[in-house]
Amino acid sequence: MELTYILFQVAVALLALASYFIHRRLTYFQRQGTPHDAPHLLRGNMEGFNSSRTIQEIMQEYYNKYRESKVPFVGFYFFQKPCAFIMDLELVKHILIKDFSNFSDKGQFYNEKDDPISAHLFHLDGPPWRSLRSKLSSTFTTSKIRAMLPAVVSVADELMAVMHEKAKRSSVLEIRELVARFTVDVIGTCAFGIQCNSLRDEKAEFLHFGKRSLVDKRHGPLLFSLMFSYPKFAKRLGLIRTAPHIQKFYQRIVYETVALREKENIKRNDFMDLLIDMKNQEERLTMEEVLAQSFVFFIAGFETSSSTMAFALYELARNPQIQDKVREEVEEFLEKHNQLLTFESTKDLKYLNMVIDETSRLYTIVPNLDRVALKRFVVPGHPKFVIEAGQSVVIPSSAIHHDPSIYPDPYRFRPERFSSEESANRPSVAWLPFGDGPRNCIGLRFGQMQMRIGLALLVKNFRFSTCSQTQDPLVYNPKSVALSAVGINLNVEAI
């Protein structure tokens, strides 16, 4: 009886301590005098997350509410994590570029011991991130990307063949699915040296697990919010972020690919070759690290490019005059270059590049950038606004892309926004689909290359238009961590 009473007292004391800690955390901005919305006990300011609203919608509404406040940041609770929600582009530039050394970490959950696939470049912080970023940068040099281009063109040619076959059978196609198959086959070839064949095989494993990776979660909302709110504590608890079937699939593919290449001494000059070389050098990567980097390269390269291409085709279908202008540019380009696509020459597709940039603005796949302050930071010009050491920071890039004071009539699709003349009149950090500064997307140029080639050949070979099955407005999947439309049906006519 006495032991039970003691345990009860301990439980009550722990509960009281936890309640006090959570109360202190959820009143942080109130004590600081920083503008903010009162948070929900568990959801913070993330009301509707994973159920009725995308992260883009949540942050857009919050940004719009405080847009006229003229303060450098406001308070935002990412579940129970208090974050400085950045409202000022000059402060964005300080965080991403000018004072990057103080904001180099992201403060995301990863667990290299229990969940090794989560410990990839996108999540890592500190010396491990710097070391890995430096090593992986050699993968995306101009010469390496140039060497991958023939493989991309080959997959694009296969996409054209499949599109012609499907267009003969039906004039209406689900374009989101088709371009996803294209990018899966590109990444499978360029990263793993594997013929995924998802363009022909509708049950291809790579496509299935690629799509599930962004939706399937190992835990429910409570533990999911715990990992976001208290990443270090969640790591000490041994929590795992990756769904088991996702981890098993990529582990099997990567381990089998590495074993085969090492046994047969196979060299393909691709991403996997670089990782294998790094594994076998003095500063070697472990197999778990090889797995993690392979996973994030596949997911990032597949999802961001395929969604952007699908959204671009959707807007071109809705704006036939813009589509005609792209087609005319592509035809003139191919005639000038003897029907050959090269890495250097595709940069000359200036209007197509403007279309891609405008699509990336209007449909920002990754809604925000996360950082954490390593030291106390007083906002220049605003001495009352301080980001304390250890404070999390959220840059709402998607909301910035829809700010009418930066992009007038922001929901209109207008590629001319990214002409050299108009771009020169905006701060560089006003466009952040791939981040900016030393921690920007390492595969940016590769992603842009595969989008240019895929879109150029699609617009050259087909005319896209809306039909009765085209959603307007588009419907997005709130359970996806990236902006993902629930089907994009377009009328497709071979030219």
Image (spheres, helix red, strand yellow):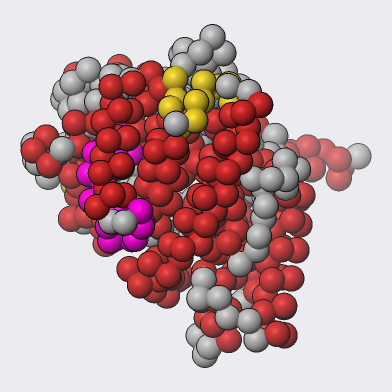
Q: Nearer the viewer, residue 392 or 4?
A: 392
- The magenta segment is 339-358
Residue placed furthest toward the top:
468
Q: Which residue does the image show at 44% across and 37% down from the upper left?
A: 461
Residue 113 in the figure: left or right of residue 54: right
The quarter of the displayed image where residue 353 is located: top left
The answer to whether one can see residue 133 in this image is no
Q: Is residue 220 visible?
A: yes
Q: How many marks?
A: 0
Depicted 128 relative to depicted 174: above or below: below
Q: What residue appears at the point 50 percent right and 49 percent down from the top-left corner?
A: 156
Whether 16 is among the magenta residues is: no
**Quarter of the image where the C terminus is located:** top left
Find residue 494 and report its horizontal and vertical position in percent. Answer: 49, 30
Q: Residue at 15% of width from left, 38% of height from top? A: 419
Q: Position of residue 335 (x, y in %)?
A: 28, 49
Relative side of 15 to 444, left or right: right
Q: Main secondary structure of the magenta part?
A: helix
Q: Going by the picture, which residue comes out furthest to the bottom?
A: 282
Residue 25 is situated, as x and y percent measured from the top left of the image, at: 46, 36
Measuring 57% from the left and 49% from the top, which residue is drawn there?
A: 158
Q: Position of residue 250 (x, y in %)?
A: 69, 58
Q: Is residue 357 magenta?
A: yes
Q: Indicate whether 433 appears above or below 265.
A: above
Q: Is residue 466 above or below residue 56?
A: above
Q: Quadrant of residue 236?
A: bottom right
Image quadrant for the N terminus? top right
